[in-house]
Image (tube, rainbow, N blue to C red):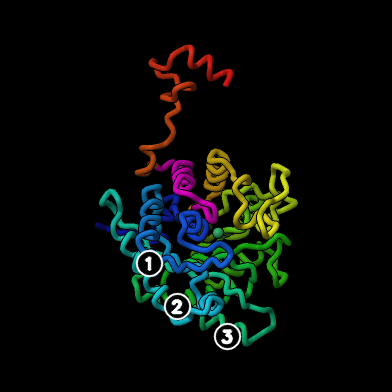
């Protein structure tokens, strides 16, 4: 079966990439919130396989290896540096296996390697830059070894760290996607504007430039519009499914929107008490429809995403995916349905309920 590569697919139309593995695996009980290390690839590979399959069923065209935070620095934090390479290879092999076996037996999915914010990059600290370069180089190397079709570098809040990631990704010869994630100050940590960072990324050879994570639709969209005007290459948009606001642009500092005092022991809604702040699926659909109309073709939902959200993305841009079979059928509801068997007295009851 023929397998188109990333740029060819993006030229043909929208491409869906499911993300948000940290949060979804945590909710499924296989990963610790806060610590956020993807040990699941080694400890419960079947759980990770299942999640990839669920996202594939919901329309994801790319199976991204779950190596987010699976880097040397995080492994040092949890005292398991010796498991770094086994973890990366296990996550990549699982992603490859799912990508090569599409549900409908049609065109295989693409498998993507993944690198991300290192947590140790520091402006003007050359030693940290060198260490980050080593971290990215080893991870990209393992991704190439395991048969990745592309590499996605993500969640960068330092412009220079994003440039460094791109430099290493490009050495692999694979298509390179770079997504940035400015914090609430709305500028990169090293003082470069969001748009200028994206222009530079295009300039130095990124195939796709965009934004992921940290921001919900409301606080990501204005930047996507500006970036779209400033660059010509393909773009990516992978927001959170949370109601971030101008006052609180990211999910790190988002107050509970019901006004209740957050009962979380750490006093924040992030990351374990965000539940009341979810966008509904229709809000997500409207966002992706608009973003696609802007000419942005690499689309998906990040932290907080469930398969339902990924299906919504796919359907918002006109795709029918395996999970579309199970999209809502309110016409058959027992009170709100319009089915001829829905009893009139139950419809009346529903109006009052
Ligand atoms: Zn995320």
User: Is residue 303 found inside the magenta-colored segment of the image?
Assistant: yes
Of labels 1 and 3, the one closer to you: 3
Residue beneath label 3, please?
130
- SS assignment at label 3: helix
Question: Taking 307 as reference, is 196 left or right?
Answer: right
- At horizontal 57% and vertical 74% (from top left) the residue drawn is 118
Label 3 – label 2 distance at C-alpha? 18 Å
Question: Taking 145 as reference, is 122 left or right?
Answer: right
Mark 2 burial class by Cα count in 10 Å: few <14, some 14-19, many 20+: many
Circle nearer the N terminus (3, 2): 2
The picture quadrant where one finds residue 52 is bottom left
Residue beneath label 1, please?
149
Q: Which residues are magenta?
A: 300-319
> Quadrant of the image for the N terminus?
bottom left
Q: Are marks 1 and 3 in contact (CB under 8 Å)?
A: no
Residue beneath label 2, please?
84
Q: Is the residue 80 above or below the residue 249 in the image?
A: below
Label 1 – label 3 distance at C-alpha? 26 Å
């Amino acid at each position: 079966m023929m397998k188109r590569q990333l740029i060819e697919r993006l030229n043909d139309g929208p491409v869906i990439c499911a993300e948000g593995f940290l949060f979804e695996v945590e909710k499924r009980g296989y990963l610790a919130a806060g610590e956020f290390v993807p040990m699941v690839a080694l400890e419960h590979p079947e759980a990770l396989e299942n999640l990839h399959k669920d996202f594939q069923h919901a329309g994801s065209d790319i199976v991204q290896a779950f190596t987010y935070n699976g880097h040397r620095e995080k492994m040092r934090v949890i005292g398991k540096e010796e498991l770094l390479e086994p973890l990366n290879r296990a996550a990549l092999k699982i992603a490859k296996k799912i990508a090569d076996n599409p549900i409908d037996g049609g065109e295989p999915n693409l498998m993507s390697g993944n690198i991300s914010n290192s947590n140790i990059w520091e402006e003007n600290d050359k030693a940290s830059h060198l260490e980050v370069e080593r971290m990215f180089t080893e991870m990209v190397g393992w991704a190439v070894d395991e048969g990745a079709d592309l590499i996605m570098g993500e969640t960068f809040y330092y412009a220079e760290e994003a440039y460094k990631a791109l430099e290493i990704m490009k050495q692999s010869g694979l298509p390179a996607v770079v997504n940035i994630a400015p914090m609430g100050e709305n500028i990169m940590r090293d003082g470069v504007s969001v748009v200028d960072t994206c222009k530079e990324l295009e300039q130095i050879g990124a195939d796709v430039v965009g934004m992921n994570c940290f921001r919900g639709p409301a606080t990501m969209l204005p930047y996507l519009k500006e970036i779209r005007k400033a660059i010509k290459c393909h773009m990516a948009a992978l927001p959170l499914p949370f109601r971030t606001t101008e006052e609180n642009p990211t999910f790190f500092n988002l107050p509970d929107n019901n006004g209740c005092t957050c009962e979380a022991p750490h006093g924040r809604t992030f990351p374990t008490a965000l539940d009341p702040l979810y966008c509904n699926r229709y809000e997500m659909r409207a966002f992706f429809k608009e973003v696609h109309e802007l000419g942005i073709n690499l689309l998906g939902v990040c932290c907080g995403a469930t398969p339902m959200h990924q299906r919504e993305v796919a359907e918002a841009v006109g795709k029918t995916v395996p999970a579309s079979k199970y999209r809502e059928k309110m016409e058959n509801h027992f009170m709100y349905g319009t089915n001829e068997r829905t009893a009139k007295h139950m419809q009346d009851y529903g109006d009052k309920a």
